[in-house]
Amino acid sequence: MADEPKLTITQQTGVAIVGFAEPNLLDAYHVNETTKDLYRLIEQEGYRLIVLDISTLKMLSSQALGVFLNMRQKLDKLNGQMAISGIDPDLSRVFKITRLQNVFDFFDNTAAAVESLLTKSEHEKNP
């Protein structure tokens, strides 16, 4: 398998922004590699605010959906937050069919997602 990065990770005001290099996250190998990279952000790099920019994704496997859900649960346990930006209309239907549309916060773009996470985080620090 190629060692090309499957994710792009940038940081903005303490928020990790994760982009996906490939349009599909389907096969087990790439999902497992992506899982390791995403969990590393939380467990090793200490990020508690994460935006998944899925604007390049067109297809997801059920395993990938499970990874997103597990990430959300990990962050919840650590008082962290996650948002999803740039969802494709077809992928939006997948989240609705699986009843995950109410589990995640969706935003049209990354800037709105980052702003929301920072606002929520600040509000939790200073209620």
Image (cartoon, rainbow, N blue to C red):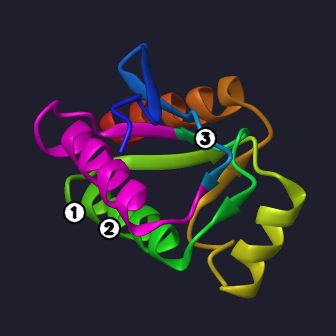
Query: In the image, which is nearer the foreground, mark 2 or mark 1?
Result: 2
Residue underneath mark 1 = 77
Give the alpha-carbon distance from disc 1 to disc 3, as whole Å. 29 Å
Give the alpha-carbon distance from disc 2 to disc 1, as whole Å. 6 Å
Q: Position of residue 3 (x, y in %)?
A: 33, 32
Q: Position of residue 88 (x, y in %)?
A: 82, 52
Q: Nearer the viewer, residue 23 or 54?
A: 23
Q: Which mark is residue 22?
A: 3
Q: Does the stretch in magenta take in 28?
A: yes
Q: Position of residue 6 (x, y in %)?
A: 46, 36
Sequence-wise, the earlier of marks 1 and 3 is: 3
Query: In the image, which is nearer the foreground, mark 1 or mark 3?
Result: 3
Q: Which residue is located at x 20 percent, y 53 percent?
A: 78
Residue underneath mark 2 = 73
Sequence-wise, the earlier of marks 3 and 2 is: 3
Q: Does the stretch in magenta take in 20?
A: no
**Mark 3, other Cα within 10 Å: few <14 / some 14–19 / many ≥20:** some
Q: Nearer the viewer, residue 74 or 36?
A: 36
The quadrant in which residue 109 appears is top right
Q: Write the start and end of the magenta stretch as one range.
A: 25-51
